[in-house]
Amino acid sequence: MNKIYYFDHAATTMVKEEVLKEMIPYFTISYGNASSIYNIGRNAKYAVECSRSKIAKAIGANEDEIYFVSCGSEADNLAIKGICLANSDKGKHIITSKIEHPAVLNTCKSMEKQGFNVTYLNVNKNGEILLQELENSIRSDTILISIMYANNEIGTIQPIEQIAKIAKKHNIIFHTDAVQAVGNVYIDVKGQNIDALSMSGHKFYGPKGIGALYIRSGINFEKIQDGGHQEKDKRAGTENVPGIVGMSKAIEIANKNLDEHIDKLTTLRNYLISEIETYIPNAILNGDRTNRLAGNVNFSFPNADGQELLLKLDAYGICTSSGSACSSGQESPSHVLTAIGLNQNLAKGTIRISLGDENTLEDVDYLIEKIKKIVNNKN
Ligand code: PLP
């Protein structure tokens, strides 16, 4: 098979070998149900609890504040629905932003159908929410602020500490969808005053089908799925033990190498941006130039067709994305690009390149050469 040049790490990442190695025994040897009391069940339970502890440590939480779920989308659903349902006696108003992932936006829409009121904050041209608009949107019945840590399309990192400070001042619960941030930025939920945080294993070299939700102890939230009493009765369903073990190993590795990871990707990202701007002068960089995820590059090429560009790059073995993974194949312009003020023409000619650990300078040069060729020669 020809080499694959993978530049779509915001969509998903490969499972690291050390991660896979750690998971295998929980498929083949200690495959017991973590609720069973015999030996292989107890081994599984022990692995789940060790993993919980590793994940808590990686984000500065306590073990009993981590709940395992099946993915980032479920973590967002459990956080928003669970918190709203348990706190509706205090109010029914939620504040979020216009550039959230559908896992948050559609969950908020679903809460609207249940009688909740949602304010969708605007963002500036770099994709940052405006703190003054946030303050102005707070009402006496606001119970939840849910703002993503970093955007999945344009990589913009939100002013999390300031948002948390505003939420705390008004006694409002603050949830952040950190699916793109975990493994890419330093997170300390206590130091940053974050009340709830969603993560997903497959975004930081762990397996797919596993996620976690941190909820600060003392915050009331309701389960949203009926069934058994797993996860302290907050999330029914047999635990995905290999997934949990893999995700905890992946976060441990990510945190250990975080400085190096950020340095390497920032260097590659800045080089890629500067080369594209040099050779394709009408290219427009979306998102903030520096306040963005180390691995995120998002460009609009006027009059280009992002889908066509993506397919032509694919023919060279290059994987990129024309929008967020979940909305690719969709014709309408991305809600994120629309929210930062891009017109339809520019939004249509946009590609996202998300770098990862295995990318090299040679890989990036290959990518630049092919983008230049396709965009400038239109072939
Ligand atoms: N939130 C953000 C910001 C994401 O980028 C994604 C996935 O791309 C999700 C939530 C959903 O995560 P999952 O694919 O694990 O359901």
Image (cartoon, helix red, strand yellow):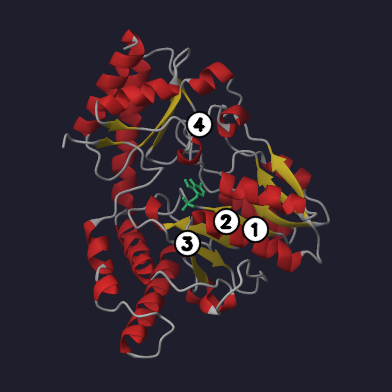
Q: Where residue 347 sits in the image (x, y, percent)?
A: 53, 23
Q: Quadrant of residue 120?
A: top right
Which residue, given by chain and number where applicable, does mark 3 sit on? Answer: 70
For the residues marked 1 and 2, what is the alpha-carbon distance in whole angstroms?
6 Å
Which residue, given by chain and number where applicable, does mark 4 sit on? Answer: 287
Is residue 131 depicted above or below 337 in this figure?
below
Q: Nearer the viewer, residue 23 or 203?
A: 23
Q: Where residue 359 sits in the image (x, y, percent)?
A: 25, 39
Q: Which label lies toward us, 2 or 3? A: 3
Q: Amino acid at mark 1?
A: Ile
- Decide which of tag 4 and tag 3 comes sooner along the chain: 3
- Decide which of tag 2 and tag 3 comes sooner along the chain: 3
Q: Secondary structure at mark 1?
A: helix
For the residues marked 2 and 4, what is the alpha-carbon distance in whole angstroms?
24 Å
Q: Are marks 4 and 3 in contact (CB under 8 Å)?
A: no
Residue 159 seen in render: no
Is residue 258 depicted above or below 320 in this figure?
below
Q: Where residue 313 sits in the image (x, y, percent)?
A: 31, 25
Taking the view exactly as shown, the residue that stands out farthest to the bottom is 38
Q: Quick one: label 4, few (<14), some, or many (20+) residues within 10 Å? A: many
- The answer to whether the residue bearing label 3 lies less than 8 angstroms from the nearest atom of ligand 1 is yes
Q: Nearer the viewer, residue 207 or 147?
A: 207
Label for residue 80? 1
